[in-house]
Image: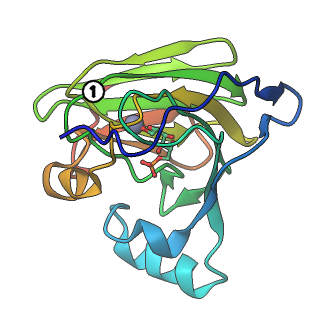
Amino acid sequence: MPDFAAPPLRPLAIAFDQATATLSPEGATLERRMSSLEGLFLDHEAWQASVADGDPVVYRVQSSPVPETDRELPQSITTIEPGTTGDELWMTKGHQHPNHQGEIYLALHGHGGLLMFDGQDAEWLDMTPGTIGYIPPGWAHRSINVGADPYSFLAVYPGGAGHDYGWVLEHGMGRRAVRRDGGAVRLLSYDGADDAGA
Ligand code: S6P
Ligand code: ZN
């Protein structure tokens, strides 16, 4: 059942600071450290070593005050730090929307990739400032920093979309993005065995 318990917000202006990629007023902000990405990097030992070695912040998500409830249209800005674990580029956990609702991302700073997977096919969008990435209903999505600087993007999504992280643990994301020996970004099959092309 839709959640109509919370009344919709009044019309609202949200200040967007382009230089810092922040929203004001702000709602919840969350920090995802390496330890919260358990089971997601292919190289488990490298992941464990990174957790033991200071458990770095991999990304932050700053939300506007618009609530994540049905009929609302919240926004958030995600900033992923540059880095690799093993040779896999730092990334978000990735999730599926339980009711298969769509979403849009707008790249703001840095260089990223938007990996999508519908359980069968994988798609990769190159995300540079100004690119709008469209996530159709039913496609799990993960963002990856492929550059040397922090990668930021704005997300706008249905308030009732939810986040199913278990779907990704069960089905994977179809591809993995790696950088070996400082070279070009490569996409591998999810088990890391094959070069799946760019
Ligand atoms: C929400 C939207 C983003 C992500 C954020 C972090 O639908 O897709 O705000 O939540 O980029 O990713 P994740 O996979 O940890 O939720
Ligand atoms: Zn989403």
| Coordinates of residue 66 in the picture (x, y in percent) | 58, 37
- Give above or below for 146 relative to 42: above
- Give above or below for 7 relative to 49: above
Q: Is residue 117 left or right of residue 73?
A: left
| Coordinates of residue 177 in the picture (x, y in percent) | 42, 41
Mark 1 secondary-structure assignment: loop
Quadrant where the C terminus is found in the figure? top left
Tell me what residue is drawn at x 53 percent, y 70 percent.
Answer: 34
- Give above or below for 177 relative to 18: below
Q: Using the image as rendered, state which of residue 100 and residue 188 is in the foreground.
A: 100
Tell me what residue is drawn at x 21 percent, y 41 percent.
Answer: 98
| Coordinates of residue 46 in the picture (x, y in percent) | 46, 74
Q: Is residue 179 left or right of residue 56?
A: left
Amino acid under label 1?
A: Gln
Q: How many marks?
A: 1
| Coordinates of residue 76 in the picture (x, y in percent) | 60, 37
Task: Identify the residue at the far left of this view.
Answer: 120
Tell me what residue is drawn at x 69 percent, y 18 percent.
Answer: 129
Q: Residues within 10 Å of mark 1 (few under 14, many from 20)?
A: some
Quadrant where the N terminus is found in the figure? top left
- Split into quadrants, the picture shows ligand 2 in the one at top left
Q: Which residue is mark 1?
A: 101
Q: Using the image as rendered, state which of residue 181 and residue 26 is in the foreground.
A: 26
